Amino acid sequence: MDFIDGEKSLNKRLQLGEQLNTSHLHLNVRSVSFINQFALPRQRKEEERKKALPKSRFNICAEEFAEKTFITENWKISVTEDISGNSNPSIRTFRTTFSKPTKENPVNSVIASAFIFVSVKGTTYNVDGYRMEGSRQIFNKVAEFNEKWIDKIVEEKKKVRKIFDMNDGGDFLKTRLPKVNPEVEEEEKAVWR
């Protein structure tokens, strides 16, 4: 009798295990369908919402100032907030990037920047002034902008790049890498073929 009861309990355990496995499988399928139906679209909506968030009043003020002040024929501008550790929440700095994108070269190797300082007093957002990259002089918001300043910054950067050419044709690397026995190098190449 004990043997039969043991066999019945074993069968019940096996049936229970199968039910658990199948229910676990259904949970997995359900969870996958839940993810596909709800979680992924919600994530996409959140990403779209983040992209479509209204701009801050600081940002709007800086962009309007940049469009009115930095009028150029040859340069495209882009305004982004420059987070550089400013501890004062009523003053923010925005970086205006000047570049000349083309179809052949959409990302320029040399760009210039201007920094716009925006402050808030009560409910009024004001531009306090701007500063060109590489200069300590802060211009008043009514100071006239000159496109030649951008050209000068870019030319200076190009000169520095010519002087400190980081691509030395591999001479630096050749002096720093260990010498390899040509026979060993050929064997390694053969292994990887």
Image (tube, rainbow, N blue to C red):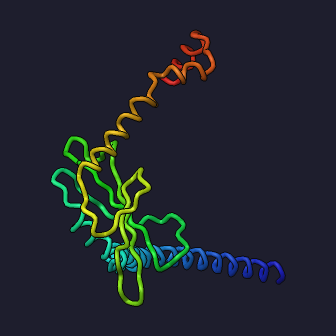
From where the camera sits, is residue 145 visible? yes
Q: Where is residue 187 in the image (x, y as percent from the top left)?
A: 57, 15
Q: Which residue is drawn at 55% across and 73% down?
A: 87
Residue sitting farthest toward the left:
73
Residue sitting farthest toward the right:
2
Query: Where on the picture, by quarter, is residue 46?
Result: bottom left
Which corner quadrant holds the N terminus? Answer: bottom right
Is 126 placed above or below 95 here? below
Q: Position of residue 80 (x, y in %)?
A: 36, 65
Query: Where on the picture, by quarter, is residue 128?
Result: bottom left
Q: Which residue is drawn at 29% across and 49% down?
A: 150
Q: Which residue is drawn at 37% across and 89% down?
A: 123
Q: Which of 60 and 134 is in front in this view?
A: 134
Query: Where on the picture, by quarter, is residue 70?
Result: bottom left
Is 107 placed above or below 41 here? above
Left or right: 9 as drawn, with respect to 1: left
Q: Position of residue 35 (x, y in %)?
A: 44, 75
Residue sitting farthest toward the top:
183
Q: Which of 189 and 11 is in front in this view?
A: 189
